[in-house]
Image (tube, rainbow, N blue to C red):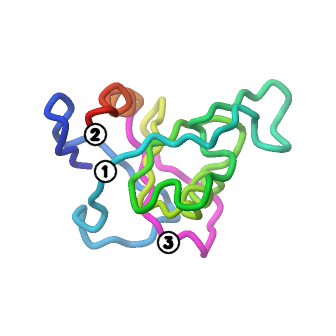
Amino acid sequence: MQVNSPAAIAGNKAALPAAFNPVIASATDIPGSVKLANDGSTAPFPGSPVGTVGTTTDACQTFPAGFFNGLLALVDRGGGCGFTVKVKNAQDAELLAFCRQQRRRHYLNGRADPTITIMSLSITLADGNAIKANSAAV
């Protein structure tokens, strides 16, 4: 994944696609600005195990219509919902592409959902935190 600005975090970042992603021809297929997800709820996903902690940035709850309006989302892992739920919630809010920060590098698997048409990637926790720290400038 190529980050172009701000200069403090510009450069190539390691990114791995989800197993259920649509095929894209090149990285230029998903250009755009990043918006930190905020689903407005710290509640864990319904049916999560007791003790699961939710955050406003986990995308386990639905977003208001048009929340992303063609932007790219940065979403935290956790919250008790699966990756497919996160991507679908963001897509329904007019998201163009999805990045989730990981603690470890691995492929993002999830149950296939034929209604998901957006690209979803996993980036490192360090890169996600750098993007968050510079989000006012993104």
The residue that disc 2 covers is: 138
**Residue under the point 33% across and 71% down:** 24
Magenta residue check for 111: yes
Measured as percent of width and height from the top left, residue 23 is found at: 38, 72
Q: Viewed as shown, does residue 1 lie left or right of 86? A: left
Please report contact status of discs 1 and 2: CB closer than 8 Å, yes or no.
yes
Does dot 3 land on a helix, a strand or a loop? Answer: loop
Does dot 2 land on a helix, a strand or a loop? Answer: loop
The residue that disc 3 covers is: 117
User: Viewer-proximal residue, 69 or 100?
Assistant: 69
Q: Viewed as shown, does residue 137 lie left or right of 93? A: left
Mark 1: few, some, or many residues within 10 Å (few <14, many ≥20)? some
Look at the image and give the residue range highlighted in magenta.
107-124
Q: What residue type is labelled 1?
A: Ser
Q: Viewed as shown, does residue 41 lie left or right of 132? A: right
Q: Which amino acid does label 3 sit on?
A: Thr
Quarter location, residue 105: top left
Quarter that holds the C terminus: top left
**Residue under the point 85% across and 43% down:** 47
